[in-house]
Amino acid sequence: VAFFVDKDLNNEVGAGEYADATAPYRGPSERPAFQRFVEILRAGPVLEVGSGPGWDADWLESQGVAVRRTDATAAFVVMQRARGAAAERLNVLSDELGGPYAGVLAMYVFQHIERGRLAGVFAKIARALMEGGAFLFSLREGERDYVEEGASGTYHISEWRKAELNHLLRGLGFMESWSGLHRDEDGRWITICLQKLG
């Protein structure tokens, strides 16, 4: 899955193609992560960073979870509003996140953040979560930093190893609750569900 963004997470190209390619479903590789995320949520809203078409928010709301849908790309916000969902623009790099939240969700987003900026994003999310809150994210596994050119646009990719992510997350008060790897046509993906300790 590719979310077509530039280094500032704000490329409008490819939103429709992305929505079509990620038609609403929860694949077998993702179900355990989402189930664990819902299990450890406390009362309160979830912030979704990079909501895209909103399929994950739809599923969470079907489980009774209140979701603040956000995306840096205006086309996705317009797309969600057109189908009756409340969505707003938010850039995780430059905007305040608000909170505290019971959970933060960011699926297939962080690989588009330049390597040197991800630690700051993790710290910002830790501050936005309430004690006991859940944090679920996925990004591309590997070691490279590069720019992909495709028919739908240009976007930055930073790949990560699990040990590198653990290093960035150390000291932020998180305990790993679930993690896994899966592969699709775009490569290997790391998915991690964390819980913020008191």
Image: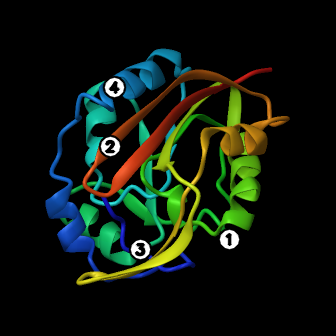
The answer to whether any part of residue 83 appears in the image is: no
- Spatial separation of the CA atoms under disc 1 and disc 4: 30 Å
Q: Is 101 located above or below residue 89 in the figure?
A: above
Q: As drawn, is 160 to the left or to the right of 35?
A: right
Q: Earlier in the sequence, mark 1 or mark 2?
A: 1
Q: Earlier in the sequence, mark 1 or mark 4?
A: 4
Q: As drawn, is 149 to the left or to the right of 80?
A: right
Q: Secondary structure at mark 3?
A: loop
| Residue that label 4 marks | 64
Q: Secondary structure at mark 4?
A: loop
Q: Residues within 10 Å of mark 4 (few under 14, many from 20)?
A: few
Tell me residue 11's x, y (percent): 42, 82
Disc number placed over residue 73 in the picture, else none? 3
| Residue that label 2 marks | 183
| Residue that label 1 marks | 94
Single out the residue that lies furthest toward the front: 143
